[in-house]
Amino acid sequence: MRVLVLGADGYLGWPTCLYFSQRGHEVAGVDNYFRRNAAADLDCESLIPAPDLFRRAKIWEDISGKKIKVHTGDITDYGSLLSLFREFNPDAVVHYAEQPSAPYSMINRDKAAFTLQNNLIGTLNIIYAVKEVNPDCHIIKLGTMGEYGTPDIDIEEGWIEIEHKGRRDKFLFPRQSGSLYHTTKIQDTDMLWFYVRTWGIRVTDLMQGPVYGLSTEETDTDHRLMPSFHYDEIFGTVLNRFIVQAVAGYPLTVYGKGSQTRGFLNLKDTMQCVYLSAVQPAEQGQLRVFNQLTELFTVNQLADKVKKVGDRLGYNVTVERIENPRVEKEEHYYNVHYTGLLELGLNPHYLTDEILETFFTITDKYKDRINKEAFFKGIKWK
């Protein structure tokens, strides 16, 4: 396949380029370096120094003999995106090119406005480029489990059947997001569903839980190929942050009671999920939704796991519960159905002590780069 990866410089985007390339597909990647620039402005840069896309693509070509075409560009510029589509004519487009942070979207009005503009116009432009260049192109969009919120019923896989006053119909599962960022992801889903119904495009929407991990088989071939790895309050996910905090000798920051439950997965499993979705695409005129996670944990359970392994390795890990800066239920029902990707062939990497030990070992190599000021910047929802 010809696979276009949007947001190719990111934590997920770059490993995805490598994953498809390694398996013989023709890959092109595009990024506007938003996250690099925003992280620099907010003093929360990646733990691991990463060359730009062009240098990384050259390193990969030297190692593997496989070429990844890379471009600098902003997908909210429709003319630029359309030209790229016409040049590459992708069979599948993997859409990571969004402002990806709930805290960032809640800093102030300007960052909220940027999140709306970037995420919704970018998604709209992709839809129009697909229609104009190759209506058969499969859009694989990274959604988020945060779209669902924490309802007091089981979370079905994207869709729910409702019986009301003797009649029955099928709807997208109700959404109730916890941030402006998550709200834009709901709007993405609604927009894609509208154009699936109207134009018959094919879409897979991956409702992904928080991702953890530092590497994949491809990035392990050379340290310069490792993904951008954020551990801060703004762009980092909770388990990644806990590991870096433990290595730095900083208390693990648990928000509130720590009973918040979420679905998690290894970075390697994100690669599997996206790849399986691409090689077994949605049908024409189908919005296919998968809940993308492998295990459920509370924040307290994650902190306990990190402390257990960290203490055994000699890090003397401490845990600190702080006032929750977010507006969210801290104690809630959470039962998620997630069989679709397993049925496609997902082989999960579960969160074992061995995986955590490897995580500690790699992080320790970069401990001199840890910026403790980035762990908690006090961004509040209210």
Image: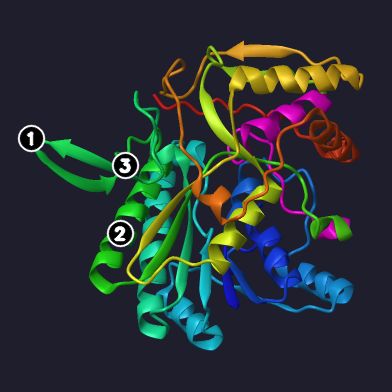
Task: For the residues labelled 1 and 2, say whether their Cβ atoms are less than 8 Å apart.
Answer: no
Where 304 falls versus 379 (above or below)?
above
* Residue 224 is a magenta residue: yes
Residue 203, picture quadrant = bottom left
Q: Which residues are magenta?
A: 222-248
Of tags 1 and 2, the one toward the viewer is: 1
Task: For the residues labelled 3 and 1, say whether their Cβ atoms are less than 8 Å apart.
Answer: no
Of tags 3 and 1, the one toward the viewer is: 1
Q: Position of residue 223 (x, y in %)?
A: 87, 55
Q: Is 239 in front, or is 230?
A: 239
Three-letter amino acid code at disc 2?
A: Trp
Where 161 falls versus 12 (above or below)?
above
Mark 1 lies on residue: 165
Mark 3 lies on residue: 173
Q: What SS does tag 2 mark?
A: helix
Q: Position of residue 244 (x, y in %)?
A: 77, 31
* Residue 268 is a magenta residue: no
Mark 2 lies on residue: 193
Three-letter amino acid code at disc 3?
A: Phe
Q: What SS does tag 3 mark?
A: loop
Q: Residues within 10 Å of mark 2 (few under 14, many from 20)?
A: many
Task: For the residues labelled 2 and 3, say whether their Cβ atoms are less than 8 Å apart.
Answer: no
Q: Is 233 in front, or is 205?
A: 205
